[in-house]
Image (cartoon, rainbow, N blue to C red):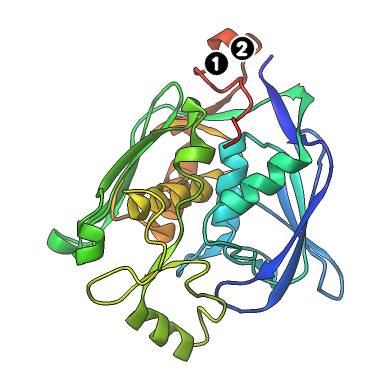
C-alpha cells in the first residue's frame, strides 16, 4: 500500500514575515491520518484552525492566503510546496502571527526542517486527486495573456514559461519542466528564491508590504541586473521559483495531484482559479489510492532524497 506520511517528531522555526516584517514562530507537529495540513493561529484570543483547502484561499495578491472566518494565514505557498515535495500528507502547523516566515525566500529551509524531524509512514492509504479531463483558465489577450491548465497524467509534472522582458531574467532559462516523481525536488526546485524589482519593493513598502524583504531572502533586481552579491542559485532560478510556487499553490487542493500542469505567466490568482475550476466539475477528477505500490506513478513510493 502506498501510505500517507507525517513527521516523526516536532520541529520549530523562527523568522519574519515577508510582507508584515513581524517576528513569527512556527511549530511543525505530526498529525493523524486523513488530517491534512492544518495551520493553527495561536496568537488569537482563541486559537483557530485553518486547513489547507483551495476554497479557503481568499487573497492571492503577491502570495496565497488561507482564511477561516476572520482568521488568516498569509504566504503559505513555500511551506506548502515543501510539504508536497516531500510527500507529506498530514501536518499540524502552529503559528504565532498572520504570516508564515519567509526564511531565505525559497522552500529549502522548510525542507530541511521537515527532513530533520523525520518522515513517518502511516497506516492509511495515500489519497490522490486524479485529473480525468483537461481543465484550463486564462486571462488577458495578446501580450497580456496568461493561462494555466491541467491534463490527465499518471504522475505529477509541471511546465512553466515566464516572460518578464527584463535583461536579468531574459538571460536565464525562461521555461522549466519538472517531474515530482523524479525525487529531485530538494535539489532542483526547493532552493529557488522569490524575486522582485527594486522599484516595486519601494512601492510595496510605501503601501505597507515587503517590510521583511531584503537581499537575504529574495532576488532583487534593478533595471538591468541582479543586485544580490552571490548571484543566482540556478541558471533558471526565476522560472524554477514559479514552479515552486505552483507546487505549493496546487497542494492547497488538500491532496497530492495526478496531473500534468502547464502554465504561461501564471501566478497565485490563476493557480487558485484553476483549482476552483477543477473542483467545480465533479466529472473532471476522482480520488484514488494504490493498494499495490507498483501501480503508483514511478518515484512516489520512495521517500524524497536529501540534498
Residue 136 % position (x, y): 32, 43
Q: Residue furthest right?
A: 46
Q: Quarter-wise, where is residue 56 in the image?
A: bottom right
Residue under the point 33% across and 33% down: 134
As drawn, is 157 to the left or to the right of 26?
Answer: left
Quarter that holds the N terminus: top right
As drawn, is 82 to the left or to the right of 169?
Answer: right
Can residue 49 be seen here? The reply is yes
Q: Residues within 10 Å of mark 1 (few under 14, many from 20)?
A: some
Residue 263 % position (x, y): 31, 46
Question: In terms of secondary structure, where does tag 1 sit?
Answer: loop
As drawn, is 257 to the left or to the right of 176?
Answer: right
Residue under the point 61% across and 63% down: 103
Can residue 36 be seen here? The reply is no
Q: Are marks 1 and 2 in contact (CB under 8 Å)?
A: yes
Query: On the image, numbered disc 1 is attached to which residue?
Result: 296
As drawn, is 295 to the left or to the right of 61?
Answer: right
In the image, 195 versus 139, the foreground residue is 195
Cα–Cα gap, marks 1 and 2 = 5 Å
Q: Is residue 88 above or below residue 60?
A: above
Residue 88 % position (x, y): 67, 37
Residue under the point 74% across and 44% down: 91
Q: Residues within 10 Å of mark 2 (few under 14, many from 20)?
A: some
Query: On the image, numbered disc 2 is attached to which residue?
Result: 293
Residue under the point 37% across and 52% down: 237
Question: In terms of secondary structure, where does tag 2 sit?
Answer: helix
Amino acid at each position: 500500500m502506498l501510505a500517507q506520511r507525517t513527521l516523526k517528531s516536532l520541529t520549530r522555526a523562527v523568522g519574519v514575515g515577508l510582507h508584515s516584517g513581524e517576528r513569527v514562530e512556527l511549530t511543525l507537529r505530526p498529525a493523524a491520518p486523513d488530517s491534512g495540513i492544518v495551520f493553527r493561529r495561536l496568537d488569537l484570543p482563541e486559537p483557530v484552525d485553518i486547513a489547507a483547502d483551495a476554497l479557503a484561499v481568499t487573497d492571492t495578491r503577491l502570495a496565497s492566503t488561507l482564511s477561516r472566518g476572520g482568521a488568516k494565514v498569509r504566504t503559505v505557498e513555500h511551506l506548502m510546496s515543501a510539504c508536497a515535495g516531500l510527500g507529506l500528507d498530514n501536518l499540524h502547523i502552529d503559528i504565532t502571527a498572520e504570516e508564515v516566515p519567509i526564511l531565505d525566500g525559497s522552500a529549502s529551509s522548510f525542507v530541511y526542517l521537515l527532513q530533520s524531524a523525520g518522515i513517518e509512514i502511516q497506516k492509511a492509504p495515500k489519497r490522490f486527486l486524479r485529473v480525468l479531463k483537461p481543465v484550463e483558465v486564462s486571462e488577458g489577450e495578446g501580450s497580456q495573456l496568461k493561462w494555466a491548465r491541467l491534463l490527465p497524467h499518471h504522475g505529477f509534472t509541471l511546465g512553466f514559461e515566464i516572460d518578464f522582458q527584463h535583461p536579468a531574467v531574459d538571460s536565464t532559462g525562461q521555461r522549466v519542466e519538472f517531474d515530482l516523481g523524479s525525487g529531485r525536488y530538494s535539489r532542483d526546485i526547493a532552493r529557488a528564491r522569490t524575486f522582485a524589482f527594486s522599484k516595486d519593493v519601494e512601492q510595496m513598502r510605501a503601501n505597507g508590504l515587503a517590510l521583511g524583504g531584503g537581499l537575504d531572502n529574495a532576488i532583487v533586481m534593478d533595471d538591468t541586473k541582479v543586485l544580490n552579491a552571490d548571484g543566482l542559485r540556478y541558471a533558471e532560478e526565476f522560472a524554477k521559483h514559479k514552479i515552486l510556487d505552483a507546487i505549493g499553490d496546487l497542494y492547497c487542493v488538500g491532496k497530492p495531484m495526478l496531473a500534468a500542469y502547464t502554465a504561461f505567466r501564471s501566478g497565485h490568482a490563476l493557480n487558485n482559479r484553476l483549482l476552483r475550476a477543477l473542483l467545480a466539475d465533479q466529472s473532471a477528477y476522482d480520488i484514488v489510492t494504490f493498494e499495490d505500490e507498483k501501480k503508483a506513478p514511478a518515484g512516489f513510493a520512495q521517500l524524497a532524497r536529501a540534498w
